[in-house]
Image (cartoon, helix red, strand yellow):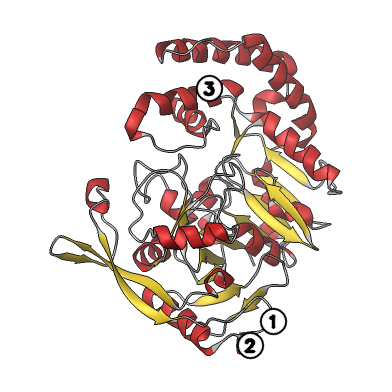
Amino acid sequence: MNTLVIGSQWGDEGKGKVIDFLTEDADIVVRSQGGSNAGHTVIAHGKKYVLHLVPSGILWPGKLNVIGNGVVINPTSLVEEMAYLRNLGVDITPQNLLLSDRAHVVLPIHKEIDAAQEEALGDHKIGTTKQGIGPTYADKVRRIGIRMADFIDPAHLEIVLKARIATANEELVRLGHPAADPQETLRAVMEAAGELRPHITDTIPVLNRATKTGKSILFEGAQGAMLDVDFGTYPYVTSSNTSAGGCCTGSGVPPTGIDKIIGVCKAYTTRVGAGPFVSEDADLADYLHGLGREFGATTGRPRRCGWADGVVLRFSAMFNGFDEMAMTNLDGLDACEEIKICTAYKLGDRTLEFPPALISEWEKCTPIYEILPGWMQDTTKCTSWKQLPTNCQAYLKRFGEIIGCPIGSVGVGPDRSQTLSVPH
């Protein structure tokens, strides 16, 4: 059984925990898009792990982890992450972590270009993490990118690096920023390349052979479907296909190789960065931040928060083809007397069941809410569906009806053990 896990909102839905929960039955865990701008937080055996590029399966012994061709890899960040995990007792070797030779490389200078481009946008900033992701994907499309395959031969790598650093510095100067130190960039990348070289291979045959021999693959999505460059709140999106289709183009496994697609959502909604957020609610944000929740795993910045957006989730479930939804952070609503679910948008005299394409229209939409009674009980100690409060069960059933996708599991806390199956 090959399973794909996709964030159904704007990222930060708790995919890492869901993936970690499912990894026990998988042989291989694959990351197929995005870069180090995404972060997965996993809490296992009372220990917290923050992952940015390395697949969550690395926390399980005996699992093969693959960073696919659709990922853009910051080599220095990846080396640092591997060292961080090893310091926490995690075993990382060329036998359990493979890097696609077709994956593109994020250079230090890409981060500087990213920051310069954001600054140039002024009040129209996208809200990127300035990790160089967009400029790297732009290089890929412009056919001037450096890939992990270029890391194999050090002499060749030095030549292509010097050429790309020179042209990137020209771009920085055009943006009104000083040029980067070419020698420091060269040194950092060459040093990281030496660490990563043993892990680089053609991962596409590896994955397809595994499928044919009956191995089970778990594909982990990064960010969320509503940040997809085609389907999301364009232009306030990321630079890759974060939807189900990106799994195939980013790994080399065909659509026929995917058996099940699971969406991940929170019991409420969050987003980081600029862009429309119809169900955003300042009071709910203050409440969640006061609980110490909803701060970015990568940046530490507070997330924007709002009630569950059924319009977004209905759309996401449709274009991703979710078989079921895994809900996280249900316990975040334990103390709410009333709980809102946005069932539609109001745009002038129109009622929308799906979000509009134009950002100018999306920003004018207002939410139409259905209000449900809260349960006002602690759910973190619940170990089964039957132990959940009656109002909580009713909320989960109604949630699935509104979005047109059943809730298959629900998280009532951060630990592995705090995931409950939902009958449907």
Image quadrant in which you'd find residue 67: top right
Disc marking residue 358? none
Tell me where residue 238 appears, x and y as whole percent: 45, 42
Crowding around mark 3 (Cα neighbors within 10 Å: few <14, some 14 to 19, many 20+) is many
Q: Given the image, on which type of amino acid does mark 3 rest?
A: Glu
* Along the line of sight, the residue nearer the viewer: 253 or 420: 420
Q: Residue furthest left?
A: 349
Mark 3 and mark 1 residues within 8 Å of each other at the beta carbon: no
Q: Which residue is tagged 1? A: 383
Could you give the CA–CA distance between mark 2 and mark 3, rounded to whole angstroms? 51 Å
SS assignment at label 3:
helix
Could you give the CA–CA distance between mark 2 and mark 1, rounded to whole angstroms? 7 Å
In the figure, 256 relative to 377: above or below? above
Image quadrant in which you'd find residue 53: top right
- Give the left or right position of residue 242, taking residue 38 as reference: left
Q: Given the image, on which type of amino acid does mark 2 rest?
A: Gln
Q: Given the image, on which type of amino acid does mark 1 rest?
A: Thr
Crowding around mark 2 (Cα neighbors within 10 Å: few <14, some 14 to 19, many 20+) is few
Q: Which residue is tagged 3? A: 112
Q: Earlier in the sequence, mark 2 or mark 3?
A: 3
Q: Residue at x 70, y 36 (%)?
A: 78
* Along the line of sight, the residue nearer the viewer: 369 or 77: 369
- For the N terminus, give its image quadrant: bottom right
Q: Residue at x 33, y 76 (%)?
A: 370
* Along the line of sight, the residue nearer the viewer: 405 or 312: 312
Disc marking residue 387? 2
* Along the line of sight, the residue nearer the viewer: 233 or 26: 233
Could you give the CA–CA distance between mark 3 and mark 1, rounded to whole angstroms? 48 Å
Tell me where residue 150 appears, x and y as whole percent: 66, 24
